[in-house]
Each structure stands twice: as structure tokens, then as C-alpha cells.
Amino acid sequence: MSAGRMRAKLHFQQRTTGDDGFGTPTVGDFAKVFTDAAEIIPRMGSEAVMGARLQGLQPVTIRVRSHVATRALDATWRAVDARSGAVYAITSPPVNVSQKNDYIDMLATIGTQADA
């Protein structure tokens, strides 16, 4: 795969945590942790994909270079397109598809539930 396909610039965000002052942990808003180049690949054809589209969601595969920060991603994170502001809810942890530890893929959805 060539790096030329990585045309999207994504801000990867994780929810902040804090304390309510009484010792109870609270979950805050999303905060940017790092920015990276990515390839956004729309998922087509399967029955699950068609069902998600009926709900207003578009499943995609996000491909990024593998490094310490991207390997820490999981389904609690989200990605925001730096140019368009589109929000991608990450729905699966990163997978080293090539087994060479060069690129990793993760499933995400863009749509109404991604903005929550």
C-alpha cells in the first residue's frame, strides 16, 4: 500500500475523566490526543452494512500507519476529520491486517450515532 492513499487528516479523540469533588469519577467531553494521516474506505455490500445505512449510518474502514499512538486506539475513541469536521465513531480495536505491523485497520461508523 502506498502512503499516497492516506489523504484524510484525522484528529483522534478520547473522553476525558475527572472527579466531581466527592471522589466519584466523571466522564467529560472528547479531547484531541493526536492527529494522523488516514485512508477512509467505505464498506459496501454486506447485509449488516445495508442495515446500518437504513439507520443513517455509513460503516467505513479507517487505515492508519501503525505506531504507539494508533495501537492504543479502541472502541471508546473517535476520529474527527480535520477538514470536514465529520465524526467517526470507532467500533472495533485496530487490527494488524498485513501482519507486518506497518498499517492497521479499524471499523468505524459515520452518522447520527457517531456524534454522541
Image: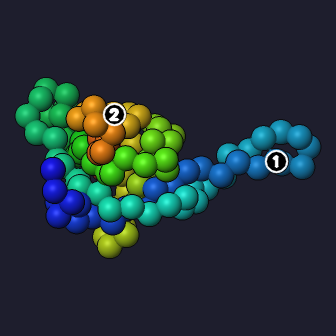
Where does the image place residue 45, in percent across and percent down from the top left? 8, 34
Q: What element carries label 2?
A: loop
Pointer 2 local density, CA inside 10 Å: few below 14, some 14–19, many at least 20: some
Q: In this view, does 11 lie above or below 90?
A: below
The front one of 73 and 87 is: 73
Where does the image place residue 23, in percent across and percent down from the top left? 89, 40
Question: Which image quadrant is residue 101 in?
Answer: top left
Q: Residue 46 carries which label?
A: none
Where does the image place residue 44, in percent across and percent down from the top left? 11, 39
The front one of 6 and 32 is: 6
Residue at 39 percent of width and 43 percent of height: 90
From the viewer's perspective, is the residue at label 2 or at label 1 nearer?
2
User: Given the current orientation, which residue lies at the most extreme left position?
Assistant: 45
Disc 2 + disc 1, Cβ < 8 Å: no
Q: Distance between the residues labelled 2 and 1?
A: 33 Å
Here the colouring is rainbow
Asked whether residue 56 is in view, the answer is no
Amino acid of disc 2: Val
Q: Mark 1 points at which residue?
A: 19
Q: What element carries label 1?
A: strand
* First in sequence: mark 2 vs mark 1: 1
Residue at 61 percent of width and 56 percent of height: 29
Q: In this view, does 56 lie above or below 37?
A: above
Residue at 14 percent of width and 34 percent of height: 50
Q: Is residue 93 left or right of residue 44?
A: right
Q: In this view, does 22 lie to the left or right of 96?
A: right
Amino acid of disc 1: Asp
Where does the image place residue 64, in percent across and percent down from the top left? 32, 51
The front one of 22 and 80 is: 80
Q: Mark 2 points at which residue?
A: 95
User: Given the current orientation, which residue lies at the most extreme front position?
Assistant: 100
